Structure formats: structure tokens, C-alpha cells
Image (cartoon, rainbow, N blue to C red):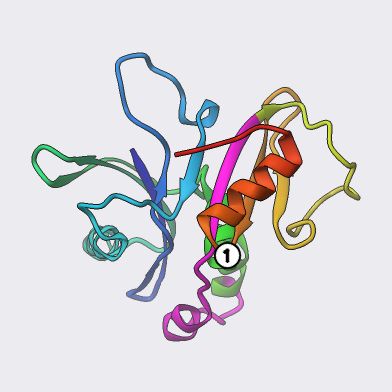
Amino acid sequence: EVSIEVIGWNGEYLPLVPVYKGETNLEGIHPIKRLRYGPCDFEEMDNEEFRKIAKHIATNLKSEGTIDMDLIYSKEENKVYAIEINTRPSGTRYLSFACTDLNPLNLLVDIAVGKFDVKELEKDMKSYCTLEIPIGDYEGPAPKAPVKEYINGNFIVHGPKGYQRVTIRGNTREETFEIAKELTGNDYSI
């Protein structure tokens, strides 16, 4: 399952990054309890193709503000299916922010004050690798609350007590996993 957030205003649309939320299966494990990462890394499906699909849907819906799309990619059919579209900030917004360095909530404020420029945002968009780990209750170094930016530029803790997650970013997938191991003491792989 893939999630992608699209910010739109006045007929201009900015699809952010496709985030992988784990395999959709019959066990019913909620994506918030799984490792999630961005950008997706399907060999058969280019991330720009996910972005094109999301932009096409947002354009046809004439959405404004933010929409969060859940997509399923079928390897057998080499097809993408849109399974859900929500008109609210995405549950993967921390991953989108970590990958692109564009905060989806700040983009909504930019729209409100008339500063939304898709061409400029496309130029400003970064390409980090990210990993989000469900941790329950964070027990690491206590950041000054409330945290509004990435600590040391590479991680942020978010979510309510008992359901907290840490979102980590690095320049490469390997660097991201190294940071994850430093923070949690665990090895992670995708």
C-alpha cells in the first residue's frame, strides 16, 4: 500500500512523495503499526509514475488544499489502484516532510497567504530517504517540546503516548538505517 499527499490550489497541483506503508493483507495490521518508508522502491514502478497518477486524480477532482491518496500496486497486473482519497492532511505527512523537506501543513498556510508556487516548490523539493518506526513510548534523549523540526536534521518523534513513532531521514537508505540503529539499538531492513 502506498500513500501520497497532493497539495493543490487554483488548478496547480504538487504531488509529494509516494510513501510505502507495507503489504496489504488479510491480517488487518494497521499501517501505523508497521515500518513505513519513503520514497517507495518498487523495481517495476517508478515513483514519478505514482506522482503522475496522483496529480491526474487531483486534477480531475479539482481538489484544493490537501488530499491524501492510498494506492495499491499490483505486481501481477503491473497496475495501480486508488483505494481511498481523503481531504485531510496525510497520516504519512511526517514521512512526506522528511523526504522532501516541504512541510505539508506549512504548504497549506502558504496557500492561505498567497505564496503557493508549484514551480518553485518543485525546485525546492529535496530527495531524502526516510523510515518511520512504531516505538510505543519514546525513551531516548528528551527533546525540547514541542518539536517542530528534525533533531540534528535527521529524526523527529511524534504521536500520542503509547503510539509514538520516530521518523528518520538520511541521504541514503543505508544512512537512514544507521541512524535508526543508533536511536533504537535495532537493525532494520526493508
Q: What element carries label 1?
A: loop
Residue 88 coordinates in the image, percent (x, y): 48, 48
Q: Inspect the image, locate mark 1, and give the three-letter code of the amino acid beneath it.
A: Asn
- Please give the residue where the numbered disc 1 appears in the rendered image: 171
Residue 190 lies in magenta, yes or no? no
Say which of 75 and 175 sits in front. 175
Residue 70 coordinates in the image, percent (x, y): 34, 42
Residue 8 coordinates in the image, percent (x, y): 40, 68
Residue 187 coordinates in the image, percent (x, y): 61, 35
First to last magenta residue range: 112-134
Answer with left or right where residue 22 lies relative to residue 177: left
Answer with left or right where residue 113 lies relative to residue 156: left
Say which of 185 and 37 sits in front. 185
State the residue at coordinates (29%, 49%). Answer: 42
Give the answer, above or below, for where 183 lies relative to 126: above
State the residue at coordinates (56%, 36%). Answer: 188
Say which of 134 and 52 sits in front. 134
